[in-house]
Image (tube, rainbow, N blue to C red):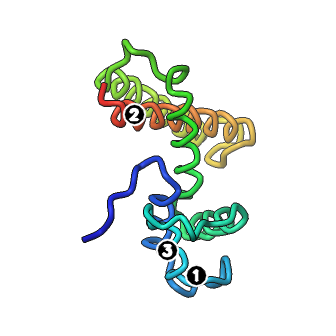
Amino acid sequence: MPKIRKPASIENGLSEVVKILSEDEIEEAIGKSSSYLRKCSDPDNKRFQIEHDESVKLDLKCIEKKKAPPLLNSHEFMISRQAKSSIINEEDNLDAILVKFAILHGKLVEVIKEAQDPSSDLGKDISDVEKREIFESIKTIEDKILKIKIAIDKNI
């Protein structure tokens, strides 16, 4: 029976890396096997712990495969849980956060469509200014996703 890992844990991030990367990709990234990562991802085994530079290399390898960086996401979630009082208000509930998320998603779509409009700065090509606006919109959505994760974890 698989062990349950807390969502806000390096162990969970490592188990996601093992799902994303092949044995060869793990070996190429850190010079170690997937067996090593499975040992590091065992929440009951404190003898094996991933090195910081290894976690960065694994996340970069996941990004090469067009996947979100699991260990970075784990770090972000762990930090946000510690600072949740400043991130999420008690009056926020999951429904309210989801509504705000939907609005932000709509704004992102709008910004991208405007950037690709033939009458925009570079026509269908996206200018550096437009890229900055898109990335700012994405960052806002990422912040809202973090609030959703915290709200679910907090059961508000």
Secondary element under disc 1, as helix, strand or loop, is helix
Image depth: mark 3 or mark 2 in front: 3
**Viewer-proximal residue among 139 and 113:** 139
Decide which of tag 3 and tag 1 comes sooner along the chain.
1
Q: Is residue 55 above or below residue 142?
A: below
Identify residue for label 1: 25
Residue at point 60% right, 66% down?
Answer: 49
Is 62 situated left or right of 1 in this image?
right
Residue drawn at (61%, 63%) of the image = 59
Of marks 1 and 2, which one's residue comes earlier in the chain? Answer: 1
Residue behind mark 3: 39
In the image, what residue type sits under mark 1?
Answer: Glu
Relative horizontal placement of residue 13, taking residue 51 as reference (left or right): left
Q: Which residue is mark 2?
A: 148
**Mark 2 crowdedness (10 Å alpha carbons): few <14, some 14-19, many ≥20:** many
Amino acid under disc 2: Ile
